[in-house]
Amino acid sequence: MKPITEQKLANKNVTPTAMRILVMNMLLEQNAAISLSDIEKSLAPADRITIYRTIKTFEEKGLVHVIEDGTGAPKYALCLEECDVNEHHDLHVHFNCISCKETFCLPNCKIPDVSLPVNFSSTEMNLIVKGICDKCAN
Amino acid sequence: MKPITEQKLANKNVTPTAMRILVMNMLLEQNAAISLSDIEKSLAPADRITIYRTIKTFEEKGLVHVIEDGTGAPKYALCLEECDVNEHHDLHVHFNCISCKETFCLPNCKIPDVSLPVNFSSTEMNLIVKGICDKCAN
DNA sequence: AAAACAATGCAATGGAATTGCATTAGTTGG
DNA sequence: CCAACTAATGCAATTCCATTGCATTGTTTT
Ligand SMILES: [Mn+2]
Ligand SMILES: [Mn+2]
Ligand SMILES: [Zn+2]
Ligand SMILES: [Zn+2]
């Protein structure tokens, strides 16, 4: 097992089983967010439900965050270290390229403050930008 | 048929059938976005698939916009007049209250500009804010 | 009225999320 | 090391929702 994989799992008290190591390694290799079925295909013939539960566990433990990019299929990407069981802190923008269909985390692109109507208070924000990514820009 | 209902449908060249009038009236009564199953329950025993196709038609014709609020069930709300077949122009923030679970359009709350990384360009943005709404505030 | 087109209702399909449960692997106290 | 317990897995089954096919019905056009 790569040391980084081991560390990621250990940091969040997730016991490093074979499947979890496979999924974590796959997540570490990505430069875009991936869907459950992406993982299933890549890890076939591994059991679909075990993958599902692995991702659920990762999500609960603050290892990955879900990105609803409007394409129908939720995508997953590794969290920053600061995330934990109780709260995710990925307050960055997510970008869905309408050309290559990839969804990226933009960790340096923070969600700006918005002034809500009076008596509304916010605990969480989610900004999806659609457009053309750098690789697809002509 | 209420004149406003008739007008909404006529404006977008949607022929006013019985089902479409029912659904449009229901949408007009709401002060929060509603899901397909909300409509189904409210209009029971009307045919589920016809409701589904009605909403699809409304969406395509620029009568309603979809809100993916992260709750799993897509919500629908009436568009502003400026929306049309080719493009929706509802660039406002959507708010999902974690207390009452309702999802609201905040038409006066525009999505702020974000500075994307170099060579990324945006065509569309979607901002969901979660928190406590005015009615649920302490 | 006939033909053409649009909308509907019901059946059927398809896909993905979720759960139940029996089995297997891993951990811990004695 | 063994028994007892807990965690993780694999497979079947369920549930839920979106979507399509098709025959029927309603509407518009000529
Ligand atoms: Mn992210
Ligand atoms: Mn809206
Ligand atoms: Zn791209
Ligand atoms: Zn509320």
Image (spheres, coloured by chain):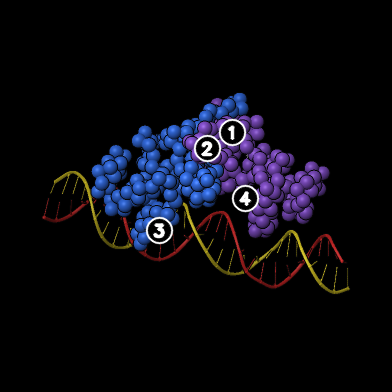
Chain colours: A blue, B purple, C yellow, D red
**Residue B60 visible at all:** yes
The residue labelled by disc 4 is B36
A107 sits to left or right of B67 = left
The residue labelled by disc 2 is A127
Residue displayed at 64% across by 57% down: B48
A52 relative to A125, above or below = below
Q: Are marks 2 and 1 in contact (CB under 8 Å)?
A: yes
x, y percent for residue A34: 43, 49
Label located before the other in sequence (1 or 4): 4
Which disc, if any, is residue B89? none
User: What type is the residue that disc 2 sits on?
Assistant: Leu
Q: SS of the residue at dot 1?
A: loop
User: What type is the residue that disc 4 sits on?
Assistant: Leu
Residue displayed at 62% across by 37% down: B91
The residue labelled by disc 3 is A41
x, y percent for residue A90: 43, 36
A85 relative to A39, above or below = above
Label located before the other in sequence (3 or 2): 3
